[in-house]
Each structure stands twice: as structure tokens, then as C-alpha cells.
Image (cartoon, helix red, strand yellow):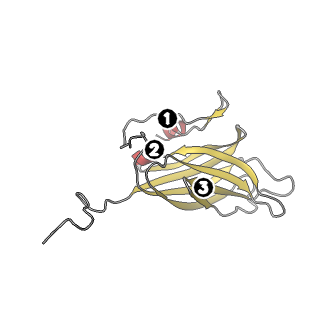
Amino acid sequence: MAERQQNIFSCFNKDRNEETLGFSFDRSIDRNRSGEAMVRGTLQVLLVGAKGLEDADFFGGMDPYAILTCRTQEQRSSTATGKGCNPEWNETFVFTVSDNVPEITIKLMDSDTLSEDDLVGKQCKICLEPLFMEGSLPPTVYNVVKDQEYRGEIKVALTFTPAEDKGEGEDYGGWGESS
């Protein structure tokens, strides 16, 4: 199963030299009229670490951090000060997921004191549809890409917890019973 997941999430197609999302599904999920997944719940992202990152600093060591984006929600990891090209975070981030959230993106940056932070690379968008079907995906390695070139790897685990239904049957806005 781990091999299949890695193939599902292969984001950089070296043959075509472009970012891609190629995957197939054995099960179906509910979709709205636009064909997008209809889900509500909590997305938990475990940012494990990265390795083999290209050093963005000319002087001194790189101090990487990650920016995780799920639709309009954005969260920032701590800065792995002095960890260079192989940072470890082991940090968990929680996002609220509602209809039409197809992906999460992770961008890696290098924190600089005297200048603007440098882009180390970005992990192409991680499609969430397999996660919605499985509930959780174990720590998986994804390629870090910048300018369509490999810049290292990042390891991420994902968990989705569906929102509980507010009750059974139809909701009549308080008019469900009359005396």
C-alpha cells in the first residue's frame, strides 16, 4: 500500500519535466454538481521533516520553515534554526475542511534576518481526495520542487476526521415539533 500511495502522490513527472497529479481511485465519494468532493471535517497535517534540501543561504546555515495552505487557511511551522538541509519539525497543524477543498500546498522557506526570506521550494499540491476516502495516510515522502527542478524531499502524514451530523432527519429550524 505504501508503494501505491507514493505513486499516487508523485507530483513531479521527470519524463515530462512538469508538476502533475496522476492517480486513480477504486471507490467513489459524493460529489456536487461541479464534480467536486463534498466533505466537511478536520484535516490534521503532521509535518515530519525534510531532507536533501538545496541550501538557499550563501553564508551560514539555512533556517527552514514551512507554510501550509488549505484554501484560505494558512499556517506556519516553527523555524528549524540551524537544522540546514535536513530539518525535523514533527509539528501538527489542524485545518477546518468544508465543501470543495481539493488540495493542500506546502511551501518551504529559509528564514533570513537581514534580508527577505528565500523560497527553498514548494511541494506541489497534495490532492486530498484519497485522504477523504481512506481517513488517514501514513507519513509519505513528497518531492520539493522549485522552477520545475527537484530540490529535496518533505515527509508529511495526513488524517481526516469527518464532521458529525447535527442529527438525523431533516432540520426544520426549530419547527420540527408543534404542540
Residue that mark 3 sits on: 68
How many residues crowd around disc 2 within 10 Å: few (fewer than 14), some, or many (20 or more)?
A: some
* Residue type, label 1: Phe
Closer to us: 165 or 122: 165
Q: Residue furthest top?
A: 15
Q: Residue at x 31, y 59 (%)?
A: 165
Mark 3 in CB contact with mark 1 (< 8 angstroms)? no
How many residues crowd around disc 3 within 10 Å: few (fewer than 14), some, or many (20 or more)?
A: many
What is the distance, in whole Å, between disc 3 and disc 1 at their CAs?
Answer: 22 Å
Query: Under tag 2, what secondary structure?
Result: helix
Residue 126 is situated, as x and y percent measured from the top left of the image, at 55, 45
Residue 170 is situated, as x and y percent measured from the top left of the image, at 24, 57
Task: Compare marks 3 and 1 and give the one earlier in the sequence.
Answer: 1
Closer to us: 23 or 83: 23
* Residue type, label 3: Leu
- Above or below: residue 15 compared with residue 90: above
* Residue type, label 2: Glu
**Image quarter of residue 173:** bottom left
Query: Under tag 1, what secondary structure?
Result: loop
Query: Under tag 3, what secondary structure?
Result: strand
Task: Compare marks 2 and 3 and give the one earlier in the sequence.
Answer: 3
Residue that mark 2 sits on: 129
Q: Residue at x 82, y 53 (%)?
A: 57
Residue that mark 1 sits on: 23
What is the distance, in whole Å, between disc 2 and disc 3 at their CAs?
Answer: 17 Å
